[in-house]
Image: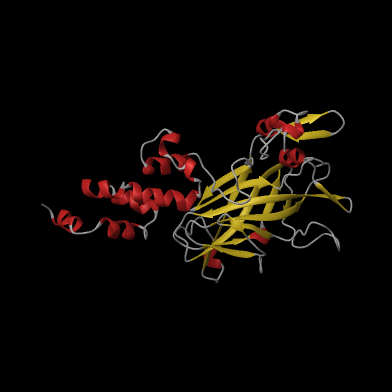
């Protein structure tokens, strides 16, 4: 019997599971390559079920591996990760369409819209605005700072627009400064200085408003003209590749980076929106209402 086997034999299952709570999923996968004993321990359902719960916050009925065609929670973790499943919670339920996604340097982001029943953008003082909901989750061990006030929308014509820092006019509604709609699936709050800190597996839903280009009457018009959304971030520490990063020129001991979410293809946009005569548009998304009896005139897929 090897020394490793003797050590593992005298370690209780509770202790082993507790030790693995200090490791990231990628580190646990690496331990599987050490030996058969470590592979058996590292594949434990207790370890990977806990990781699935921490990362995705799914209800119990959606946490069954067989639902996704796998037999273990390690397989479930890989399946959800490969499908870019976003964490579930307040303002990030899975019936909301995702219009953009990105995974960069251990941070995963998704883009949704603050959808309105008439599918229109918000008119204020002759200009039009739209609410973006940016879901950000930190998958790395290091803490990440998100600069919500500097989020930008890049349009296909080369122009850019930055998140609104304040209302465009006194008394304008809704309040348009960046806000935290939800934090780890629960009610959020205000952002004091435009920055928010995310630790390992923490996620947030940010609300920002941006000014639309001329002619963007509907949400679909904005999505069709937008190219990508840039989310700037920073992480304490030095850069690993100075040939691709100029953070050494910024003396603040942070690694400055970001993630770009490309907007989905136009064919996907128009497969989710339907336009009718008379300037009427609907989002082809299943309604969250329990009953559709009060909206019998429209098919269920048109309810918003």
From the viewer's perspective, tell me whether residue 204 is left or right of residue 159: left
As drawn, the residue found furthest toward the right would be: 126
Quadrant of the image occupied by residue 214: top right
**Residue 1 rendering spot, x and y as whole percentages:** 10, 52
**Residue 235 rendering spot, x and y as whole percentages:** 51, 63
Vertical position of residue 190 compared to residue 282: above or below: below
Q: Residue at x 54, y 46 (%)?
A: 86
**Residue 296 rendering spot, x and y as whole percentages:** 75, 29
**Residue 218 rendering spot, x and y as whole percentages:** 79, 40
From the viewer's perspective, tell me whether residue 140 is left or right of residue 227: left
Q: What colour scheme has been applied to the protein in the rendered image?
A: secondary structure
Q: Work out whether residue 135 or residue 292 is closer to the camera in this orientation and state it.
A: 292
Q: Is residue 202 visible?
A: yes
Quadrant of the image occupied by residue 283: top right
Q: Work out whether residue 53 or residue 22 is closer to the camera in this orientation and state it.
A: 53
Vertical position of residue 86 compared to residue 171: above or below: above
Q: Residue at x 52, y 43 (%)?
A: 85
């Amino acid at each position: 019997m090897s020394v490793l086997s003797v050590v593992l034999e005298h370690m209780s299952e509770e202790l082993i599971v507790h030790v693995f709570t200090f490791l990231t999923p990628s580190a646990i996968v690496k331990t599987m390559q050490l030996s058969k004993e470590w592979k058996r321990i590292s594949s434990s359902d207790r370890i990977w079920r806990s990781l699935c719960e921490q990362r995705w916050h799914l209800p119990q009925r959606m946490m069954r591996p067989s639902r996704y065609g796998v037999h273990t929670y390690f397989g479930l973790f890989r399946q959800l990760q490969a499908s870019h499943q976003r964490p579930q919670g307040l303002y990030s339920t899975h019936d909301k369409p995702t219009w953009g996604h990105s995974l960069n340097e251990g941070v995963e982001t998704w883009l949704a819209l603050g959808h309105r029943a008439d599918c229109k953008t918000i008119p204020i003082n002759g200009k039009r605005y739209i609410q973006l909901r940016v879901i950000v989750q930190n998958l790395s061990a290091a803490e990440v700072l998100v600069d919500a006030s500097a989020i930008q929308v890049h349009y296909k014509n080369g122009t850019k627009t930055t998140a609104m820092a304040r209302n465009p006019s006194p008394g304008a509604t809704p309040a348009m400064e960046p806000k935290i709609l939800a934090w780890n699936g629960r009610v959020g709050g205000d952002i004091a200085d435009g920055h928010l800190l995310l630790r390992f597996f923490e996620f947030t839903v940010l609300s920002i408003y941006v000014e639309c280009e001329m002619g963007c009457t509907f949400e679909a018009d904005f999505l069709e003209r937008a190219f990508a959304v840039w989310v700037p971030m920073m992480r304490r520490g030095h850069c690993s590749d100075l040939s691709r990063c100029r953070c050494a020129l910024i003396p603040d001991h942070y690694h400055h980076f970001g993630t770009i979410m490309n907007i989905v293809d136009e064919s996907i946009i128009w497969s989710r929106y339907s336009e009718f005569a008379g300037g009427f548009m609907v989002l082809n998304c299943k309604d969250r209402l329990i009953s559709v009896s009060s909206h019998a005139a429209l098919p269920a897929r048109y309810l918003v």
